[in-house]
Amino acid sequence: MTAPLRYQRPIDVLRNLPAKIEAEKSFLGSVFLDNGVLDRERLTPEDFRLESHRRIYMTMLELWEGRIPIDPVILSDRLEKKDWSRHTGGFEYLDELSIVVPTAANAYHYARILKEQTALRKAKIFNAQHAQAIDEGDLEKISTIQQKIGEIAVIRGEDGFKPLDIRMCISTPPPPQEYVVGHLPDELGIFGMLIGPDGSRKSWLALHIALAVAGGRPVALAPDGKALWSAPKSGKVLYLTLEDSESVLWRRIWDIGLVPGYGWIGEAANNLCILPVPSCDIVSVDSGGIPEPTSNVNRIIREGKGARLIIIDPLAEVLDASENDDRAAKCLVQTLRRISRETGAAVLGVHHQNKTGMMNGEKHAQSSRGSSKIPAGSRWTIVLQPGEDPDWTCVTEGKASYARRDSEKWLHVLRIDDGTGREIASVPVAEDAPDEKPVVVTRGGRLKYPEGGKNVVPDPDDDWG
């Protein structure tokens, strides 16, 4: 005798339905900060698991349809008139909701989470009904439920598109454009690039940027106060390095720590995670020749959750395909953007320059190696070129999609001795254009100019890079 199939009782299913209560609170809190969220994000009461939140949301919609402003006082009054106040926590709970989030900018993401949870709840209910229908042998009911499950999949697939609210754009002042560092936009789905030929100190600059963002300090700060970019807002940084070993990075950090004014590095360590890894492909080609993201993408997303900046050095080492393959390059661009969206961090990739760019000293964003789709997808590109004097590196903003490009900047090797003339460290730091003698710093932090030759001054007619 065949045992009957087991399925959950309806009451058990309802008790264990998935929900993200914090996302519900955050969305309702966003409405208090910007009532227009109700126009932009189309939710239904069923998108809220808690009955109290459903009633709050329905009352918010009622007020907004009458174009009545929504704040804790007005909403509390309307809930009392509907005799719902005792079901929704009263004014005190509404007041708490109004300060749950500092900005309404993430309302779209909260709404997306709630829609996902609604789809999961429906799927769980339909799954239980489907199991019961199979046990009962009701083919018509099975077909109906399968159709409903298919409708959930269609809704989830369409949810990725969000039209821009034009009326909101002309009625509400936009937030100011902010940057993570330099002109790297502080926006979701963003990546930038550092490109240059071999030996142009790309990885040194990447490390300087990582330390600066982690510590909230100026980038490549020199002892005399010069810097490539002003101090950014501090935040967590994930630095994934695939070429330099742990000992190489150790020596670089040690050398930077010897530069006067860098005593803060120890504190910045709380925000900085450097991962030297031998291999970490994020895009590979399947057996059919189609590029696709690898499982390493999810690993990076897990490590980078909540970061302000993720640095990948170099991009060539995470692409298990030809750099000239446009399809693989497109997949790489989309994957970098996905990492940014799902972690909340801007992504900065270190990449090599092409041969023509190296030979001609080119300083534009399209001089990177491989498919043009990679630099085209970047929103901020820094191009490094060695100077005629090997101690100098020109730093050019080859692309700044959301800002006016800066003028050229320079890195110069700062040499540190032990006070007796023996060099113990050398670090590239910010410097004015190469028209002065190089600086040497003693271990005690004293600046001095060595006797002897000046740096090479370029011929104005020579495009020397």
Image: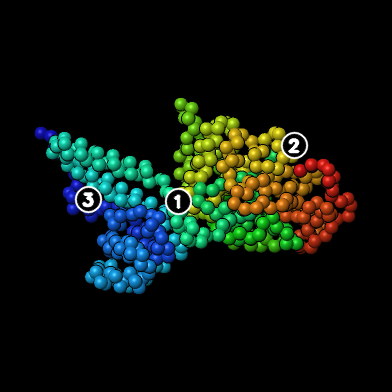
> Badge 2 is on which residue?
360
Give the mark nearest the N terminus, 3 or 1.
Answer: 3
Q: Secondary structure at mark 2?
A: helix
For disc 2, the neighbor class at 10 Å (few under 14, some 14 to 19, many from 20) is few
**Which one is closest to the eye, mark 1 or mark 2?**
1
Give the mark nearest the N terminus, 1 or 2.
Answer: 1
The residues tagged by marks 3 and 1 sit, at their Cα atoms, a distance apart of 38 Å
Viewport quadrant of the C terminus: top right
Q: Where is residue 132 shown, x and y percent of the image?
A: 17, 42
Q: Where is residue 144 shown, x and y percent of the image?
A: 20, 39
> Taking 430 as reference, is 295 left or right?
left
The residue furthest top is 288
Which residue is rendered at x = 52% and y = 60% of the image? 175
> Taking 61 as reference, is 351 left or right?
right
Kindly indicate whether the residue at mark 2 contacts the one at mark 1 (C-beta within 8 angstroms).
no
Q: Secondary structure at mark 1?
A: loop
Which residue is rendered at x = 79% and y = 63% of the image? 446
Q: Amino acid at mark 1?
A: Leu
Which residue is rendered at x = 35% and y = 53% of the image? 42
Q: Where is residue 172 shown, x and y percent of the image?
A: 48, 61
Q: Where is residue 99 shown, x and y percent of the image?
A: 41, 68
Q: Amino acid at mark 2?
A: Asn
> Which colour scheme appears in the figure?
rainbow
The residues tagged by marks 1 and 2 sit, at their Cα atoms, a distance apart of 43 Å
Above or below residue 78? Residue 287 is: above
Q: Which mark is residue 13?
A: 3
Viewport quadrant of the N terminus: top left
Q: Quadrant of residue 216?
A: bottom right
- The answer to whether residue 320 is seen in the rendering is no
> Badge 1 is on which residue?
164
Give the mark nearest the N terminus, 3 or 2.
Answer: 3
